[in-house]
């Protein structure tokens, strides 16, 4: 049986952030902003970003950076080198 745990993302001060979610599964950890999956870090070491929504808005970018622990510049470099994979994560 697949285990799933959903929680609100927390700010650096520890308060819950509305509409920003961390979803933990047996396969890895997802970051969801509102209704869209933005990123997935698998336990096998691969990181996937949704090709449509990874850089959707200022708010999404702020919390994506927090989830990944890096700046947008670092994220762009990892996309360019293939370390991060752009993929359809929302089934569209």
Image (spheres, grey):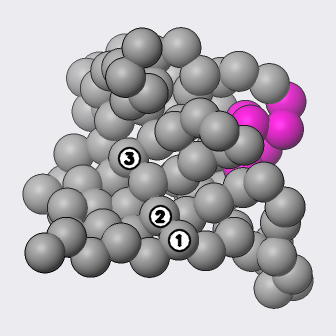
Q: Which mark is residue 23?
A: 2
Question: Which of the two discs, 3 and 1, sits closer to the camera?
Answer: 1
Residues at badges 2 and 1 in contact (C-beta under 8 Å)? yes
| Quadrant of res 13 | bottom right
- Residue nearest the observer in this picture, 92 or 58: 92
Mark 2: give few (<14), some (14-19) or many (20+) Cα within 10 Å: some
Q: Residue at x 27, y 76 (%)?
A: 3
Q: Main secondary structure of the magenta part?
A: helix
Which residue has dot 1 on it? Answer: 6
Q: Which residues are magenta?
A: 58-63
Quarter of the rendering occupied by the N terminus: bottom left
- Residue nearest the observer in this picture, 11 or 53: 53
Quarter of the rendering occupied by the C terminus: top left
| Quadrant of res 73 | top right
Earlier along the polypeptide chain: callout 3 or callout 1? Answer: 1
Q: Residue at x 57, y 27 (%)?
A: 54
């Amino acid at each position: 049986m697949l285990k799933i745990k959903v929680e609100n993302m927390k700010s650096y001060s520890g308060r819950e952030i509305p509409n920003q979610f961390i979803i933990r599964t047996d396969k890895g950890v997802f970051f969801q902003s509102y209704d869209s999956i933005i990123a997935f870090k698998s336990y096998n070491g691969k990181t996937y970003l949704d090709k449509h929504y990874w850089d959707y808005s200022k708010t999404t970018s702020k919390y994506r950076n927090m989830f990944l622990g890096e700046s947008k510049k670092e994220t762009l470099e990892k996309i360019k080198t293939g370390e991060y994979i752009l993929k359809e994560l929302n089934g569209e």
